[in-house]
Image (cartoon, rainbow, N blue to C red):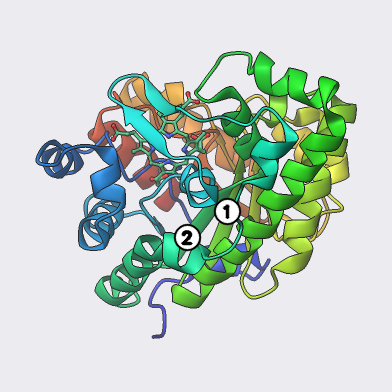
Amino acid sequence: MKLKNDLILKAAKGQNVERTPVWLMRQAGRILPEYRKIRNSLSGFKELVETPQLAAEVTIQPVDILKVDAAIIFSDILVIPESMGLKYEMIEKKGPFFSKTISNRNDINALNVSNVEDHLSYVFEAIKITKHELSGRVPLIGFAGAPWTILAYMVEGQGSKTFSKAKSFLYREPELAHLLLNKITEITIKYLKLQIKAGADLVQVFDSWAGILSPEYYEEFGLKYLEIICNSINEVPKTIFSKGAFFALEKMNGLNCETIGLDWTMSIKNATQTFNNKTLQGNLDPCVLYGDYNTIEKKTKEMLHKFENYRHIANLGHGVYPDTDPEKVKCFIESVKSYK
Ligand code: 1CP
């Protein structure tokens, strides 16, 4: 089906656009009362993720309500460890929890990288339904976690401020870490290709914990695998978002991807001088949306001004915080759309 609004695809490919496209990381979720209504009628987050018709419905909500220029499929990066054999629970107000974690070679050998088509069939089904129901209004973004970020959860077993268990695994067992990263990379490539086959128009890889590694370690345990993923996927434009990895931007210029996500700590001036032949995505501080309407409009326009004449997809520098007022989110989106 032909897309009626393909701004984000054009911007990703560096083609001329009549205005900057805009969407928000974590736009499908708790900021919307319409989402909470569906979510509260279910046993939990996982039931929503695993019920394709409902996952499609909450994926489309931000397109209808917020008028963003792209939808992102409602799922989580943690479906990949689960497909490999580590089941996760999503604990209310706390986050993900894995009762089984990875600590030795036997644990890694026991992981399964096949049958992702069956294990995650609910994701592909949700993508097909979403594409059908969007009927070309906006493109659909598929996604996965980056191998390092997925390893971090598989070793740590839950969210953490420092991920010191996961980081210490890299220092204590570098060979096993590479073995695990190779397995995650292999299944992630299959997973992204299946999302594209099901209808994803563009894919984003989230390396949420990139910024806790040293530059040397991020190159060895992070970028190396992002490079393999980028080189293996050529069907649609790819975005790499390495949160906190300001130290790696120069190296990331060499990745075979169209778009690089920037968080709000990264200097736009620095980034526009570092990259060539890439689109940049981001990077308003999510906390700007706690400001009043004038501040949101002013800060958004200042950001757009700094990206002027550069290939750009407007977004926040990380996911929108759950207690953000949807009216403030609309103000951000309107400010991008009305920018001249
Ligand atoms: O109660 C709820 O409804 C659960 C909250 C929630 C939601 C809405 C979680 C738990 N995941 C999601 C959906 C989700 N996760 C999306 C949906 C699409 C969208 O963006 O609108 C996406 C892209 C993700 C990706 C994700 N999950 C990342 C990478 C992006 C990022 O924010 O850095 C990470 C790190 C996760 C793990 C995760 N899932 C949920 C939580 C609370 C966490 C973080 C836990 C931690 O602190 O480590």
Q: Is residue 275 above or below residue 246?
A: below
Q: Is the residue at mark 2 in contact range of ligand 1, meaning its CB lies under 8 Å from it?
A: no
Observer-nearest of 181 and 298 = 181
**Which residue carries the number 1 mark?**
204
Residue 202 position within the rendered picture, expressed as x and y whole percent measured from the top left: 55, 65
Observer-nearest of 105 and 2 = 105
Q: Is residue 152 visible?
A: yes
Q: Is residue 18 visible?
A: no
Residue 274 position within the rendered picture, expressed as x and y whole percent measured from the top left: 85, 42
Q: Which residue appears at 36% of the width and 26% of the height?
A: 294
**Which residue carries the number 2 mark?**
141
Of the 4 image quadrants, the one containing the N terminus is bottom left
Observer-nearest of 5 and 194 = 194
Classify residue 36 as left or right of residue 120: left
Contact between marks 1 and 2 (CB within 8 A): the answer is yes
Observer-nearest of 256 and 299 = 256
Q: Is residue 19 above or below residue 261?
A: below
Give the mark nearest the N terminus, 1 or 2: 2
The amino acid at mark 1 is Gln
Cα distance, mark 1 to mark 2?
7 Å
Q: For mark 2, give the secondary structure.
A: strand
| Label 1: few (<14), some (14–19) or many (≥20) C-alpha neighbours in 10 Å | many
Q: For mark 1, give the secondary structure.
A: strand
